[in-house]
Image (spheres, rainbow, N blue to C red):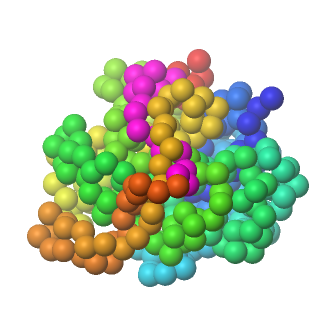
Amino acid sequence: MAHKMIIDTDIGTYYDDAFAVLLACRSPEVDLLGVTTVYGDVALRSKIARKVLNVAGREDVPVFSGIGRPLQGKSLMFGFEGENILDPGDEDLRPEDEHAVDFIVRTIMDNPGEVSVVTLGAVSNLAMAYVKEPAIAQNMKELVIMGGVIVPIVDQKGIRRSPVEEYNLNNDPMAAQIVFNSDMPIVLVPIDVTLQVPLRDDQTQKIHASNDPVGKLVSGILKVWPPQERTIYLSVGIPTEHTGLWLHDPLTVALVFDKTFCETTRLHVAAEFAPTPIERDLIVRNDVLRTIPRKDEPNMDVAVTVEADRFTDLFTARVCGE
Ligand SMILES: [Ca+2]
């Protein structure tokens, strides 16, 4: 039976949330129950999600706007915000009236033990859903979170990735603490693992050659992404020659239906604030949430390795309609 799934996403800031939604649409193993939006301009994000689903022929999948303002701190909007997805004729794209938090609680409680929730942005909606109905922790099948850094690494492009390099959890640190301290069955997919799944050149060429509507949408996004990323990175002082087309969010979706893409280990991961050196800024910040493994009772499964070629080949084939 297909895996019942809710995707909670900050679609629009980076390119790969749209790719994750499209992969779910194109995966027969997935029963996509709804897409919820989070962080910043959730109305715009919902419009983008609605459009992406429609292109994939999934007008039946509902979209719900969630929490735009982090429980703590302020949201920073940046990204491509739908360029090459939305067009001027899309003014009427609308989400459902129900709030994302209510939809998440209702859907989990109506389908005990069956719903996998995948978060691809800040975990504000999940934190509020848990506060509203703590029993979702025992009634969800799993919560698969793209976020955090477990093993700080130097990526293949030569950039050191410390906990500050991961935005999803730092965009709402209080929400991350609530979720980590809940009893939700968490699978954490940290960025030190997702940085191992960039699209290869032969795969992007195959996507650019695709005549499939989903393949064409992915191709269009890939074309506008490098200049967008350059703008985003320059605005925070990051060298832009080091970037790659990583599939952080699609990998997180794929893990719901094929756990063998990643090797996981049971860890206790604490979300806490600790002094964090930020090499690019030559400062030490105390307001950065770190994901720190502790020798303590495990509270989640953490992805530690990934079969990169097998996953990126699957992604490429599915968005090209094969
Ligand atoms: Ca995201």
Q: Point out residue 89 in the picture as x, y percentages from the top left corner.
A: 62, 56
Q: Quadrant of the C terminus?
A: top right
Residue at far top of view: 322
Instruction: Reply above or below: 20 against 172.
Output: above
**Residue range corresponding to the magenta coloring:** 298-314
Look at the image and say whether residue 305 sits in the magenta stretch: yes
- Viewer-nearest residue: 303 or 159: 303
Side (left or right) of 223 relative to 297? left
Q: Position of residue 148 (x, y in %)?
A: 41, 56
Residue nearer the viewer, 98 or 147: 147
Residue 16's spot in the image, x, y percent?
A: 46, 46
Residue plotted at (74% across, 68% down): 134
> Taking 227 as reference, is 209 above or below it?
above
Residue drawn where x is 34% and y is 35% of the image: 196
Residue 286 figure quarter = bottom left
Task: Say whether residue 292 is left or right of residue 189.
Answer: left
Camera sees residue 89:
no
Q: Nearer the viewer, residue 98 or 214?
A: 98
Q: Residue furthest front?
A: 296
Quadrant location, the N terminus? top right
x 64%, y 32%: residue: 257
Taking 132 as reference, is 163 above or below it?
above
Observer able to see residue 301: yes
Q: Could you tell me which residue is drawn at 33 percent across and 78 percent down?
A: 287
Image position of 229 with respect to 77: above or below: above
Image quadrant of residue 211?
top right
Single out the residue that lies furthest toward the left: 282
**Horizontal arrangement in the rendering, residue 229 relative to residue 28 (left or right):** left
Locate residue 146, reporting x and y percent: 49, 51
Residue 27 magenta-highlighted: no
